[in-house]
Image (tube, rainbow, N blue to C red):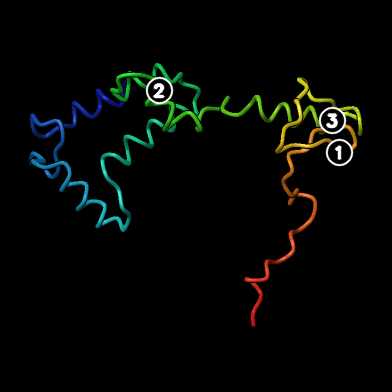
Amino acid sequence: MQIFVTGYQARQTDSVIERGAKKVANIKKAFQAASARAGVHVTPYTLRHTGAVWAAEGGASMDELAQLMGHDDAATTSKRYDRYSPTYLRGVVSKVQRRVSEPKGSFEPSAPVAPSAKTGRILGKIWSGKEDSNLRPLPPEDSALPG
């Protein structure tokens, strides 16, 4: 809070934003000029987004962040900022960690999946029918080869 008091006491005009003891009439133009002088592209939206990301990374709830951002509901906020939350995807990661730490061959799906036309059973396990590119590289497609 002290930073706001110090800023208020150091003001040279009655304006909220000033530069060189003069009122800044157009914040967008002021940001463009300052951004050009600094050699970076910064807009007021950049600062707004950065603050929201920092709040999400700090653990702010999407409801709180929605109120801060002025969004009508937290769903709008979640679409944009949920991925920055420290708990985002934590459940998925814990499942992967659980699977990796289990002895080989002991993993069983938590819920049985009925085979369909697009799935099959290989060695008693459900298989999606898709090539597993994590285990070996896929061969090049003919159209990708030169000549």
The answer for how far apart the CA atoms under marks 3 and 2 are is 35 Å
Foreground: 29 or 5? Answer: 29
Q: Position of residue 87 (x, y in %)?
A: 58, 24
Mark 3 or mark 1, which is nearer to you?
1
User: Which circle's residue, 3 or 2, is located before the other in the chain?
Assistant: 2
Say which element carries label 2: helix
Q: Position of residue 60 (x, y in %)?
A: 46, 21
For disc 2, the marked residue is 75
Foreground: 124 or 81? Answer: 124
Q: Say which amino acid is labelled 3.
A: Ser
Instruction: Please report contact status of discs 3 and 1: CB closer than 8 Å, yes or no.
Output: no
Tell me which corner region of the image, top left, top right, bottom left or bottom right, holds residue 18. Answer: top left
Quarter of the image for the N terminus: give it. top left
Does residue 17 lie above or below 62 as drawn? below
Tell me which corner region of the image, top left, top right, bottom left or bottom right, holds residue 116. Answer: top right
Say left or right for 135 vs 75: right
Q: At 28% across and 22% down in the image, what residue appears?
A: 70
Q: Say which amino acid is labelled 2.
A: Ala
For disc 3, the marked residue is 101
Say left or right for 57 vs 132: left
The answer for how far apart the CA atoms under marks 2 and 1 are is 40 Å
For disc 1, the marked residue is 122
Q: Position of residue 113 (x, y in %)?
A: 75, 25
Q: At 26% across and 40% down in the image, what residue appears?
A: 44
Say which element carries label 1: strand
Q: Position of residue 130 (x, y in %)?
A: 72, 46
Quarter of the image for the C terminus: give it. bottom right
